[in-house]
Image (cartoon, rainbow, N blue to C red):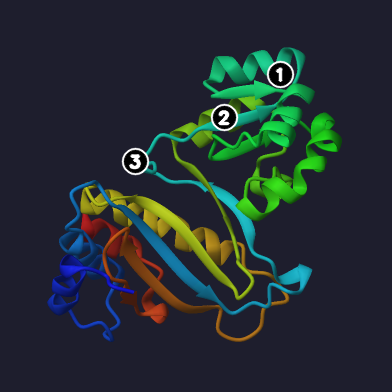
């Protein structure tokens, strides 16, 4: 695959095999983001888990301190008072059976996050084959099946993100935009790493953080030393 001249120039500007500190990696990614648009910065981790085993799936959601830097479209499956609360909180689309049918019959998928009340999950469950592969299926562990709809909508609009291991144990999470200040990206990075460590399954054995890489949408990946991936309070303060 031809990565283009900008990519080729970018990879000349650093050592692709060196393991950097988190702050060094963030600085490099910002400097290597040369696209004409505001690139998304993504953190990719390889975890020492076996996602084929239910007790080793790492899944959840967290609020990024500095937000994601992008508009998040939230769809809510709710009825009655909770539907009204969702609209008041800023949900982009709200419905019950009608929304389920719209997705089934029309293929409507113009949203980034789907939230549902527990009483509607029987109907939403019919959409598993459509929403599941796209990572849009509401799930209690990810905070997207809840009775507190207004809070969930507000959090996802403000920068709450979902995460889940893929079939080989990788987790990809956006941590902001290349235009963010270094301190904002570092804050978000730390929040993600701390959350992944908190979510470590009891059944996981051996080294947990196998690899950690930060990159921008069009830029190359910058490797972080897994042994030093977790920032101390002193390192965080020094990065501000």
Q: How far apart are marks 2 and 1 (CA)?
A: 11 Å
Compare marks 2 and 1 and give the one earlier in the sequence: 1
How dense is the environment of label 3, judged by Cα within 10 Å: few (below 14), some, or many (20 and up)?
some
Where's the N terminus, which quadrant? bottom left
Residue 88 is situated, as x and y percent measured from the top left of the image, at 56, 14
> On residue 69, which mark appears?
3
Foreground of the two, 30 or 191: 30
Residue 13 is situated, as x and y percent measured from the top left of the image, at 13, 75
Compare marks 2 and 3 and give the one earlier in the sequence: 3
Foreground of the two, 19 or 41: 41
Compare marks 1 and 3 and give the one earlier in the sequence: 3
Residue 141 falls left or right of residue 88: right
Say which element carries label 1. helix
Compared to 80, does 194 lie above or below?
below
> On residue 153, which mark appears?
2
> On residue 175, which mark appears?
none
Say which element carries label 2. helix
Q: Which residue in the protein does label 1 denote? A: 82
How dense is the environment of label 1, judged by Cα within 10 Å: few (below 14), some, or many (20 and up)?
some
Q: How many labels, in total?
A: 3
Say which element carries label 3. loop
Q: How far apart are marks 1 and 3 (CA)?
A: 27 Å
Q: Distance between the residues labelled 2 and 3?
A: 16 Å
The answer to the question of whether label 2 and label 1 lie on touching residues, with beta carbons closer than 8 A, is: no
Q: In which quarter of the image is residue 35?
A: bottom left
Residue 146 is situated, as x and y percent measured from the top left of the image, at 72, 34
The residue under the point 76% across, 69% down is 55
Residue 214 is situated, as x and y percent measured from the top left of the image, at 34, 66
The answer to the question of whether label 2 and label 3 lie on touching residues, with beta carbons closer than 8 A, is: no
């Amino acid at each position: 695959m031809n990565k283009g001249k900008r990519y080729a120039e970018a990879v000349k500007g650093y050592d692709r095999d060196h393991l950097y500190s988190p702050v060094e990696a963030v600085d490099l990614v910002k400097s290597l983001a040369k696209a004409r648009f505001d690139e998304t910065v993504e953190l990719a981790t390889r975890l020492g888990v076996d996602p084929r085993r239910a007790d080793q799936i790492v899944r959840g959601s967290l609020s990024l301190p500095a937000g994601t830097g992008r508009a998040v479209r939230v769809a809510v499956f709710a009825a009655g008072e909770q539907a009204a609360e969702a609209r008041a909180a800023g949900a982009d689309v709200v419905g019950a059976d009608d929304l389920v049918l719209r997705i089934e019959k029309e293929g409507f998928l113009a949203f980034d996050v789907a939230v549902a009340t527990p009483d509607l999950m029987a109907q939403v469950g019919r959409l598993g084959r459509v929403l599941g592969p796209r990572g849009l299926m509401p799930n209690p562990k990810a905070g997207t099946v809840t009775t507190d709809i207004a809070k969930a909508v507000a959090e996802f609009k403000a920068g709450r993100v979902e995460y889940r291991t893929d079939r080989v144990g990788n987790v990809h999470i956006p941590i902001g935009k290349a235009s963010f200040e270094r301190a904002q990206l570092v804050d978000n990075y730390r929040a993600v790493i701390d959350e992944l460590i908190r979510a470590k399954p009891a059944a996981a054995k051996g080294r947990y953080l196998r690899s950690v890489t930060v990159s921008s949408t069009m830029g190359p990946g910058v490797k972080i030393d897994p042994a030093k991936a977790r920032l101390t309070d002193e390192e965080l303060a020094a990065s501000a």
